[in-house]
Image (cartoon, helix red, strand yellow):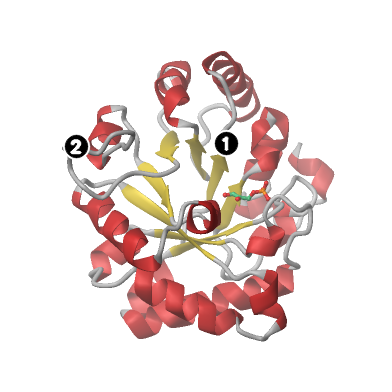
Amino acid sequence: MRKKIVAANWKMNMTQAEAARFVESLLLELGDIADVEVVIVPPFTAIAKVTEALGKSQNIKIGAQNMHWERNGAFTGEISAALLRDLFVRYVVLGHSERRTLFGETDKIVNRKVRAAHEATLRPIVCVGETLVQRDKGSVEKILSIQLHGSLATLGAKELQETVIAYEPVWAIGTGRNATPEQAQEAHAFIRHTLREMSDETTAERVRLQYGGSVNPENARELMSQPDIDGALVGGASLDPRSFAQIVLSAREEDKTAAPSATV
Ligand code: 13P
């Protein structure tokens, strides 16, 4: 049984003060929730503040939004896996479509980062997803296959099992237009099928797959109740602690059949 994982990608938002207030409110909403894995992914500048605000809370983890593949050295402006570990970071988002399109990250670069993350025992959340043009051309599976084979190249079964894959269709990011649960499930099933080909049945069954792209408290439950959707990577709606908490609570297994209002 895969434990659901819901992550808040704050992107380039949140001052330290805002981050501290967010965590305070989130803890009031969720307590130290144990049945869903929650990851907060602040900008680098707010990581330490989030850790401090989480205090003794054990089950809410910290992620970073990016990192460099080298261990250390003359790479002005970059952050290494070891520097993130020093801040108690456990997860790192790699290959987000904003990094791929705005900062020229290729699958090869993403793969170097993924391998460096594993070497440092950081767990990567690797993002894949097609553009609208690619979807309209009927190339979703081709694009996902290329991105998965490229970004996850040379990983062993254990590393794959400790990798989270986020399916984020580019056309659904920040647009208010989420993939339908059927579209998302279809893509997730294909990703799991590809993992099976790249590794083995047990590994493919263990890898957690998140959906990302305009997830909100209204659509989260139905998306996450699909058989191959094991959580969400949330952008815009993760900036509000109440919305994010509702999304987290809707990932609970026992809530699957409940009415949406019962999650609040
Ligand atoms: P939105 O939830 O704002 O669409 O962003 C999704 C995303 O990019 C999460 O990484």
Left or right: 68 as drawn, with respect to 140: left
Residue 263 as seen in the image, left or right of residue 45: right
Q: Mark 1 points at which residue?
A: 10
Location of residue 172 in the rendering, given as x and y in whole percent from the top left corner:
70, 59
Which residue occupies 79% across, 42% down?
262
Residue 134, position as x, y percentages in the image = 64, 77
Please tell me whether residue 11 is drawn above or below residue 70 in the rendered image: above
**Distance from label 2 to label 1 (Cα)?**
28 Å
User: In this image, 26 relative to 118: left or right?
Assistant: right
Q: Residues within 10 Å of mark 2 (few under 14, many from 20)?
A: few
Check disc 1 and give the amino acid type.
Trp
Residue 137 place in picture, x, y as percent: 68, 85
Q: In this view, does 227 lie above or below 92?
A: below
Question: 219 and 87: which one is in front?
Answer: 87
Q: Which mark is residue 74?
A: 2
Observer-nearest of 123 and 126 = 126
> Is residue 98 at least partly visible in the picture?
yes
Residue 230: image location, x then y, percent: 54, 60
Q: What amino acid does circle 2 point to?
A: Ala
Placement of the C terminus among the 4 image quadrants:
top right
SS at mark 1 in the image? loop
Q: If you read the primary sequence from the N terminus, does the residue marked by circle 2 or circle 1 appear first?
A: 1
Q: Which residue is drawn at 52% across and 84% down?
A: 142
Residue 68: give its label: none
